[in-house]
């Protein structure tokens, strides 16, 4: 098992859900955590919670769509802690709608955050990891990165892109630069993702679904990340497909 105490992690989308749960979990194991998101008020609350439990965290105001913001955030973390050992590309959006509703602004935003944002943070962190000749990159895909669902066509397209990029990244930087890559593919998780659904029909579907099964919690995904992160140095857990027991599809 790899000892991760004293390692430095950058988590995007850290203000809620899976990102916040992972920050708490990693900090509890001795990882220094860079909390990145646009909502710094929520990050400050999370930082205080981590500090009260004896952990170490740094608040980073970051918009993953803005390359200057990403680079500034990465530099702030390196300046504070001297390295970046873990990157968790977790920021994402999921506003469901039918294609013929033509909510093209939502399409563009999903592509910008889910795909381009992930590329921006990866590009900003990779030089540091290459310099260290060590690192671990986690990318949040989804069950929607393996299957396609009505109402999620554009979201599925973005998450399929994340899955493909993760596998290619692993092949290119694993042996060459000693950087592990893990693609996390959750099923239904209780997060703020559903609050972004503007289509009332699909929003109701998600609310109904939550009554039919026990959704995963952010902490469940954090546990899978910890498992992959603590794997022996020669082991790369490339994919983790994590579903509620009651989720058949």
Image (tube, grey):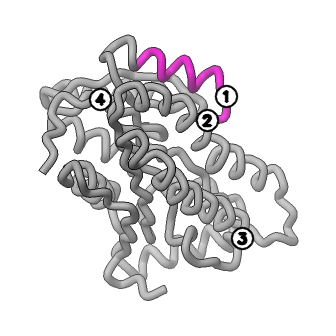
Question: How far apart, in angstroms, are the residues tagged by discs 1 and 2?
Answer: 8 Å
State the residue position of label 2.
120
Q: Quick one: SS at disc 1?
A: loop
Question: How far apart, in angstroms, are the residues tagged by discs 3 and 1?
Answer: 25 Å
Question: How far apart, in angstroms, are the residues tagged by discs 2 and 3?
Answer: 23 Å
Q: Residue 1, position in %: x, y?
A: 12, 51
User: Do the residues under discs 1 and 2 have CB atoms within 8 angstroms?
Assistant: yes
Residue found at the far bottom of this picture: 248
Please check the rendered image and state whether residue 153 is part of the magenta-colored stretch, yes or no: no
Question: How far apart, in angstroms, are the residues tagged by discs 1 and 4?
Answer: 22 Å
Instruction: Tell me the crowding category of disc 1: few under 14, some 14 to 19, or many 20 or more residues within 10 angstroms, Cα based.
Output: some
State the residue position of label 3.
153
State whether residue 94 is above or below residue 178: below
Question: How far apart, in angstroms, are the residues tagged by discs 2 and 4?
Answer: 19 Å
State the residue position of label 4.
8
Answer with mark 3 or mark 1, whichever residue precedes in sequence: 1
Q: Quick one: SS at disc 3?
A: helix
Answer with mark 3 or mark 4, whichever residue precedes in sequence: 4
State whether residue 124 is above or below residue 171: above
User: What number is the disc on residue 58?
Assistant: none
Q: Residue 92, position in %: x, y?
A: 56, 49
Residue found at x 36% / y 48%:
180
State whether residue 117 is above or below residue 195: above
Answer with mark 1 or mark 2, whichever residue precedes in sequence: 1
State the residue position of label 1.
66
């Amino acid at each position: 098992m790899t000892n991760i105490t004293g390692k430095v992690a950058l988590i995007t989308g850290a203000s809620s859900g899976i990102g916040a749960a992972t920050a708490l979990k990693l900090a509890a194991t001795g990882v220094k955590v860079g909390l990145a998101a646009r909502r710094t008020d929520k990050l400050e609350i999370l930082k205080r919670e981590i500090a009260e439990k004896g952990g170490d965290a740094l608040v980073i105001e970051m918009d993953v769509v803005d390359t200057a913001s990403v680079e500034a955030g990465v530099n702030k973390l390196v300046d504070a802690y001297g390295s970046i050992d873990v990157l968790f590309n977790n920021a994402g959006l999921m506003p469901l709608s039918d294609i013929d509703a033509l909510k093209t602004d939502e399409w563009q935003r999903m592509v910008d955050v889910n795909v381009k944002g992930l590329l921006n943070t990866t590009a900003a962190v990779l030089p540091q990891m290459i310099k260290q000749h060590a690192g671990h990159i986690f990318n949040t895909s989804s069950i929607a990165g393996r299957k396609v669902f009505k109402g999620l066509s554009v979201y599925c397209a973005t998450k399929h892109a994340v899955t493909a990029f993760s596998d290619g990244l692993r092949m290119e930087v694993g042996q060459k630069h000693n950087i592990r890559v893990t693609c996390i593919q959750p099923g239904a998780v209780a997060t703020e993702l559903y609050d972004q659904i503007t289509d009332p029909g699909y929003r109701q579907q998600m609310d109904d679904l939550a009554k039919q099964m026990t959704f995963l919690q952010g902490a469940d995904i954090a546990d899978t990340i910890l498992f992959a992160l603590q794997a022996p140095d020669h082991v790369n857990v490339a994919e983790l497909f994590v579903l509620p027991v009651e989720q058949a599809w």
